[in-house]
Amino acid sequence: MIKNQVSTVLLAILSSCHTAFAGGAIVLNSNECIILDGNGKEETVSGSLHTVQNANNYHYICKAQVTPPSSGHAAYFDYENTGLTCGDNNFEWHETVSTSGNAVVDCLITPAAPPKS
């Protein structure tokens, strides 16, 4: 299970003006995405990043081609099955990887998100 492999990893979704990277983190910026592949392993890929702002909330969406799931079925990752947070304690994110390896990561950043119980 991914949670056991990366229990201390922070999922960091960064805006295009940031370039920081912590080992094992998932990073999205304007030039590349460091995300999970279809088998839950970290992969650096060229991707497209879209940012949408609405009432101080930001959606960071990265679309990229990654290694497809070896199971032959689409893979779905989120806080619940990885234990990773998005940014600074934001739990609202998910990634879907299709059987052909098309990955889409969607992260909602809300200022001062409350801690998850």
Image: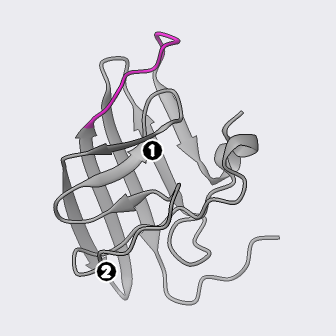
Residue farthest toward the right in the current orientation of the protein = 117
The N terminus is located in which quarter?
A: top right
Q: What amino acid is at disc 2?
A: Asn
Q: Quadrant of residue 89?
A: bottom right
Image side of residue 15 versus residue 88, left or right: left
Instruction: Farthest residue to the front: give it.
Output: 23
Q: Is residue 60 above or below residue 45?
A: below
The three-letter code of the residue at mark 1 reads Glu
Among numbered discs 2 and 1, the one appearing first in the sequence? 2
Residue at 69% from the left image edge and 49% from the top image edge: 80
How far across and down, in percent of the image, does residue 59 sit?
Answer: 35, 68
Q: In this picture, which residue range is highlighted in magenta?
A: 65-73
Task: Name the residue: 69% across, 42% down.
Answer: 5
Circle 1 crowding by C-alpha within 10 Å: few under 14, some 14–19, many from 20: many
Indicate the position of residue 40 as horizontal and vertical percent values: 53, 35
Where does label 2 land, which residue? Answer: 54
Instruction: Tell me what residue is drawn at x 26 percent, y 65 percent.
Output: 29
The percent position of residue 31, horizontal first and vertical second, equals 16, 60
Relative to 81, residue 79 above or below? below
Residue at which label 1 appears: 95
Instruction: Indicate yes or no whether the magenta region holds residue 71.
Output: yes
